[in-house]
Amino acid sequence: MYFASVGDYFKITALKYKNKKAVIHNNKSITFNNLEKKSNLIVKFLIKKGLRINDNICIKSKKNLDIFALIIACTKLGISYTFLDRKSPTERLSKIIQVVKPKLIIFDEPSNLSNSKFPRLSINLLKKNINKENEFLEKDLLIKPNGNTIAYVMFTSGSTGEPKGVAISHDQLINFMLWAKEYFNINKNSKSTNLNALYFDNSIFDIFGSLYNGSSIYSFDRNE
C-alpha cells in the first residue's frame, strides 16, 4: 500500500485497530479511534493558529495523552516538531530554538527562555481550545504533506557540545515503520513500552515503529 505521508499511515492504523488501547500513561488510556479524533481536533486548532505545512513547532512538556495526539497532528498537517529536554540548561534550549525558529512553542509550565519573539502556548490552553473544534477535513489542508516533508528534527549534543539537528522526512519514517512492522511482527496483540524521553532518538521506535503500527504503548515518566 502507498502512503503519501505519515499522517495517512496513522489514519489507516487507527481505522484497523480503532477499539484497541493506543497509549496507556499514568493509569489513563486512549483508544486508537479516540487518538485519531483528538489529533484531528488539534490539526484544526493549529490551522486556526496560522500553522501550515513546512512550519515548525517546539514542545517542552511532560508526557501525557495529548502530547501523543499532538505528534500525530503534526504529521497530518505536515509541520515538523522538536522536543526540548525540560532539564537542559536554558542556554542550550535557546540555541535549539534559534536554529528551529518555531512558529509556536508549546509548554506545560512557565519557562525563563529568552526567546520571547516566538509565540507560545500552554498545553492546558491547547486542551481547552481543541474541545471547541470540529474534526478537520482534507480540504482544510491547503497543501498536503508528501514524502519530502520534514516530520521531526532531533537534536544531539555533537562532538563540540553545540546542538546539532537532524531532520527526518515522511518517506524516511514510512520506510522505517514498514520495516519495524515486518521485522518485529507487530500485530493486534502487540504491546510495547515507551521508557525513552520524547526528545531522545530511541523514542522514535516507540512512537513510529510501535504505536503507528498498531501496538499499544505503555508510557512511563522520568521518575518511574
Image (cartoon, rainbow, N blue to C red):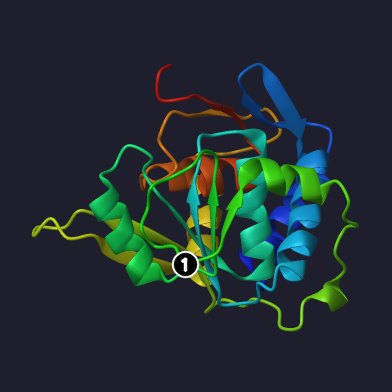
Measured from the top left, where is residue 222 in percent x and y?
A: 40, 25
Against 177, residue 24 (above or below) is: above
> Image point 25% across, 53% down: which residue?
92
Asked whether, in this view, residue 137 is left or right of residue 177, the answer is right
Measured from the top left, where is residue 158 in percent x and y?
A: 16, 58
Asked whether residue 36 is in view, the answer is no
Measured from the top left, where is residue 53 in percent x and y?
A: 63, 77
Asked whether, in this view, residue 85 is left or right of residue 141, the answer is left
Quadrant placement of the C terminus: top left
Asked whether residue 89 is in view, the answer is yes
> Residue under circle 1?
172
Q: Amino acid at mark 1?
A: Gln
Asked whether, in this view, residue 131 is left or right of residue 167, the answer is right
> Image point 80% across, 50% down: which residue?
130
> Image point 20% across, 53% down: which residue?
157
Residue that lies at the very extreme toward the bottom in this rendered image: 143
